Image (cartoon, rainbow, N blue to C red):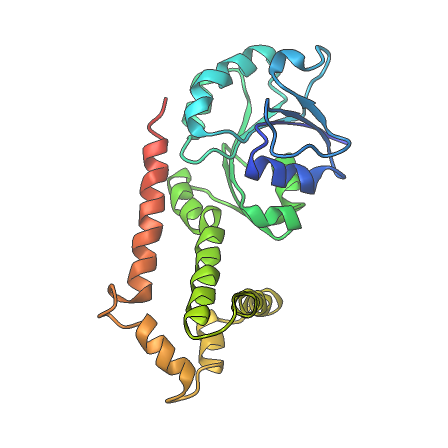
């Protein structure tokens, strides 16, 4: 069983730890982890880690702003070119890690998302050379994986899948509030909105070859209630339509990733 060291145990780090605990030997360094899971070694700092410990992979799951301070320290401690170095920090390029870890042979950027906790994650990966087998194994175990050939597309992919769950949570939140405004009780409105998204997602999951546009047409009767709602969502008079609004939102996320990548 491979040794995997996770640096940082916030929302994403803890989600991955929860999914990986039965598949890998995990150690986590974080002074204030989100939650402790039985069977995982937790340390407050690198100095608390057993001196004989060597990981097969190191995964940095901390805020990008912290990386310039801590990466050189870990590079001194784990000076073995066989170790896989991975980062799930938005915006931080392969070049950043190459700059601070010149001896490292295997570097991979990953952008998973929160559904990885339930083995339904979507992870985007990019590395130097061919896809790394351990990186692939780690993230295939928590959902689907896409490898990019061009790191320049990584921020765009992050804006779609890395940030994406929040967009859908927002939609459920707003649809529930719309139901409440129409007189439904809060529990009923929340239940309707949640299960409707789950059901729609199940359709996409079990019919992967199907087109979302085709599924939309299947539930849209001419001159019916669904069409009336979609005419509002797609109207260019309403913030340019939902499509335009989503493009603006995704571009804002991509641009922020680029800003975070300016940290050196």
Measuring 68% from the left and 15% from the top, which residue is drawn there? 49
108 left or right, relative to 178: right
In the orientation shown, which residue stands out farthest toward the left? 237
Asked if residue 15 is positioned above or below residue 260 in the image, the reply reads: below
* Residue 108 percent location from the top left of the image: 53, 32
Image vertical order of residue 257 relative to residue 184, above or below: above
Residue at 41 percent across and 84 percent down: it is 225
Query: At 45% from the left edge and 23% from the top edge, which residue is drawn?
Result: 66
When the figure is inspected, residue 217 is found, relative to residue 27, above or below; the finding is: below
Q: Residue at x 55, y 22 (%)?
A: 105
Give the percent coordinates (x, y) of residue 208.
Answer: 57, 66
Q: With 146 as the anchor, is 3 left or right in this view?
A: right
| 59 lies left or right of 216 | right
Quarter placement of the C terminus: top left
Residue 3 location in percent, x, y? 71, 27
| Whether residue 197 is situated above or below residue 132 in the rendered picture | below
* Residue 156: % across, % down: 38, 46
Tally of numbered tags: 0
Foreground residue among 233 and 256: 233
Q: Residue furthest bottom?
A: 223
The image quadrant where one finds the N terminus is: top right
Residue 101 visible in the displayed image = no
Quarter where residue 229 is shown: bottom left
Q: Nearer the viewer, residue 194 or 234?
A: 194
């Amino acid at each position: 069983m491979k040794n995997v060291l996770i640096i940082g145990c916030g929302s994403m780090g803890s989600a991955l730890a929860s999914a990986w605990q039965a598949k890998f030997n995990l150690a986590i360094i974080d002074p204030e982890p989100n939650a402790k899971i039985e069977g995982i070694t937790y340390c407050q700092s690198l100095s608390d880690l057993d001196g004989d410990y060597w990981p097969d992979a190191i995964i940095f799951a901390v805020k990008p702003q912290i990386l310039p301070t801590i990466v050189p320290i870990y590079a001194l401690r784990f000076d073995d070119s066989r170790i896989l170095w991975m980062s799930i920090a938005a915006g931080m390029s392969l070049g950043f890690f190459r700059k601070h870890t010149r001896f490292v042979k295997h570097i991979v950027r990953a952008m998973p998302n929160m559904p990885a906790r339930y083995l339904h994650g979507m992870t985007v990966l990019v590395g130097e050379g061919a896809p790394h087998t351990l990186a692939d194994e780690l993230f295939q175990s928590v959902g689907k994986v896409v490898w990019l050939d061009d790191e320049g597309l990584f921020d765009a992919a992050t804006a779609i899948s890395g940030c994406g769950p929040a967009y859908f949570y927002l939609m459920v939140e707003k649809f529930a509030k719309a139901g409440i405004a129409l007189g439904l009780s809060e529990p009923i409105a929340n239940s309707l909105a949640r299960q409707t998204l789950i059901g729609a997602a199940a359709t996409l999951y079990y019919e992967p070859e199907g087109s979302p546009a085709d599924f939309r047409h299947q539930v849209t009767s001419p001159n019916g209630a669904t069409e009336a709602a979609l005419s509002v969502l797609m109207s260019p008079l309403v913030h340019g339509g939902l499509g335009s609004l989503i493009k603006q939102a995704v571009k804002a996320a991509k641009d922020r990733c680029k800003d975070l990548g300016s940290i050196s």
